Image (cartoon, helix red, strand yellow):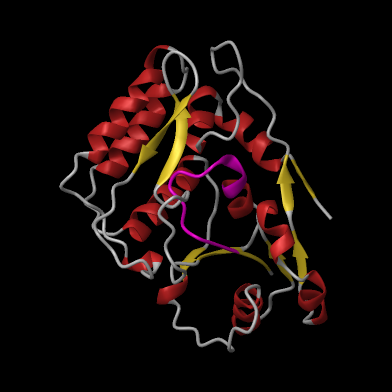
Amino acid sequence: MKIAINQPYFFPYLGYYSLIKHTDEFILMDTFQFVKQSWMRRNKILKNPEGWCYIMVPCANYNRNARIMDIIIDNKQDWKVQILNKLHYYKKIAPHYYSVIRLVEDLFSNEYSDLATLNRDTLSIICEYLDIPCKMFTFSKMGYSIENINEPDDWALNICKVRGNVNEYWNLPSGKDFYNTDKYRDSGIDIKFPQNNLRPYEQKRSSFESGMSILDVLMFNDKSVVHEMLDDFEFIK
């Protein structure tokens, strides 16, 4: 079985969803320390007339050592409207604007108090839209008791061990230098780092902005093209 483990991000980039599509199980690690300036509470979309801007979820006051699962959304701020207003830029330029904005509006019709639940649902709703079968689990709710963590990369390895029947662990390529691959292979687990070939697509502007949220990809591309992008990767060594 192939599994991946990652923190729950807010409408992350295409490579994150590629990881979900090509593994058998995806575990959201919500017990790690929350990092304010991270993809857990924000992502990038295009802005008028050039460049990009953040869409962001405001968080209430929290302890600096707070875990992701403990982060409360500051619903006193009208953050949903602010995000929808920023996405309105796509209306005149993106062929799939109405399908995607309806997706976001449906999500935002729900009330969310904590960030981890919101992010889980952003992932689920995109997977549903793209017809990606997804077995997604939240670590804090799995009831696992894992071995002591002696080194930072022990988390994923020990979860794989207690999960059982895991022969491949996939991780985003940005974390490659973080892992001791020999340690995983000694435990019978092949660790892989898929790197998506994030080719440019038409954004109706003078230059291509890379690294945007999945929302940008969906605005401009048919589902079939998005799947071609999700499948276009190679493992880095």
Relative to residue 184, is residue 52 depicted above or below? above
In depth, the one of 209 and 112 nearer the eye is 209
For this orientation, the residue located farthest to the front is 64
Relative to residue 94, is residue 218 depicted above or below? below
Q: Residue at x 44, y 83 (%)?
A: 143
Residue 234: x and y in percent read: 79, 46
Residue 49 highlighted magenta (yes or no): no
Say which quadrant the N terminus sits in: bottom right
Residue 109: x and y in percent read: 23, 43
- In magenta, the rendered stretch is 5-16
In depth, the one of 198 and 152 nearer the eye is 152
Residue 6: x and y in percent read: 55, 61
Relative to residue 114, is residue 122 depicted above or below? above
Residue 6 highlighted magenta (yes or no): yes
Q: Is residue 157 left or right of residue 117?
A: right
In depth, the one of 204 and 103 nearer the eye is 204
Q: Residue at x 61, y 20 (%)?
A: 208
Q: Is residue 118 left or right of residue 95?
A: left
Q: Is residue 91 left or right of residue 136?
A: left
For this orientation, the residue located farthest to the left is 76
Residue 43: x and y in percent read: 45, 40
How many numbered marks does the figure carry? Answer: 0
Relative to residue 94, is residue 58 depicted above or below? below
Q: Residue at x 53, y 56 (%)?
A: 134
Say which quadrant the C terminus sits in: bottom right
Q: Is residue 160 left or right of residue 192?
A: left
| Quadrant hosting residue 211 | top right
